[in-house]
Image (cartoon, rainbow, N blue to C red):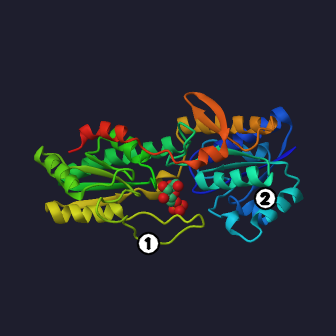
Amino acid sequence: MRVGVLTGGGDCPGLNAVIRGIVRKGVQEYGYDFTGFRDGWRGPLEGDSIQLDIPAVRGILPRGGTILGSSRTNPLKVDNGIRRIKENLAKSEVDALIAIGGEDTLGVAATLSDDHGVPCVGVPKTIDNDLSATDYTFGFDTAVNIATEAIDRLHTTAESHMRVLVVEVMGRHAGWIAIHSGLAGGANVILIPEQPFDVDQVCAWVTSRFKASYAPIVVVSEGAKPKDGDMVLKDGSLDEFGHVRLSGVGEWLAKEIERRTGKEARTTVLGHVQRGGTPSAFDRWLATRFGLHAIDAVREGDFGKMVALRGTDIVRVPIAQATAQLKTVDPKLYNEVGVFFG
Ligand code: F6P
């Protein structure tokens, strides 16, 4: 049995831990061989692969990024993409494929598995934590820790200058990073994509914080948008899955706050810092367990499934079901943290 492995979409801390878990258990317990496809779906599409064996995964557990590389290549948008993938899998004698990725990568895996008979198992990944069917995705905990540390640091410099600091964090459709890091870091305003915000209300919270003689920290998801107006973007370019490149709302909001309150405001965009570097202990634990359970699914021939965390158990769910709907922040949860605004 030869198993192909690929990592697609934006990278995130813990990808290497998944690869290690898959290969260690697959080789040691089941005697499988592995092929690592390079750069997400580009690898099987172009037949670009590397050998994946135990020496190749030694020492990678704490390493950020992915030893396989990643891309946002969408084979469904490429001429004969599916046929080419099938031919290359046959050429490399790959019997099954494990795709580690978010909504887009797994969406392709679901199509390949359900409609084209390619045996695929999915592993959910994204720092945004917006995949339904799993309580958490790995990478999220690391990103929240990085954002929380940044907010802690920004509090002291904001206080020294008595100015507003706006912190833009990742979160395209869902405000999980913003709400978790904002609450953990004691932010005074948290703005998320699920709840369009009123700039006057934000300014009122900022002003009330200054009245209490403290400097406000505003945490904003890159996908958050003002109530009356469109999403603020620096650049309108799209990736192969049709997603627009985000970032810009933080800078726009700081300018609006300055204009409306007369208080000095600055922006920090955390960007890819949230995705880089070593995974937290929780993410290493979760990613490793996902890897071990993914290779078990292959062993049992349970294809078209994605491994998922439910409570403390790892379960399997149909990939198509897991990617059908995004997991967004419940308004009740947002209201719960609202007590700290202002
Ligand atoms: O999908 C995860 C994510 O981190 C989004 O929050 C963000 O918009 C996107 O990746 C940015 O990725 P890149 O800069 O690699 O296109």
**Location of residue 321 by image quarter:** top right
Spatial CA distance of label 2 from label 1 is 33 Å
Badge 2 is on which residue? 49
Viewer-proximal residue among 317 and 212: 317
Viewer-proximal residue among 61 and 234: 234
Badge 1 is on which residue? 235
Position of 319 relative to 237 (above/below): above
The type of residue carrying mark 2 is Ser
Say which element carries label 2: strand
Position of 9 relative to 280 (above/below): below
Residue at image location 44% in from the left, 44% down from the top: 144
Q: Residue 291, how many percent across, how many down?
A: 69, 39
Viewer-proximal residue among 19 and 248: 248
Of the 4 image quadrants, the one containing the C terminus is: top left
Say which element carries label 1: loop
Residue at image location 19% in from the left, 61% down from the top: 264
* Mark 2 closeness class: few <14, some 14–19, many ≥20 residues within 10 Å: some
Q: How many labels does the image show?
A: 2
Q: Residue 182, how many percent across, how many down?
A: 34, 44
Do tag 2 and tag 1 residues touch (Cβ < 8 Å)?
Answer: no
Residue at image location 85% in from the left, 41% down from the top: 32
The type of residue carrying mark 1 is Asp
Cβ(mark 2) to ligand 1 < 8 Å?
Answer: no
Residue depth check, mark 2 versus mark 1: number of the one nearer the observer: 1
Q: Earlier in the sequence, mark 2 or mark 1?
A: 2
Of the 4 image quadrants, the one containing the N terminus is: top right
The circle on residue 320 is none
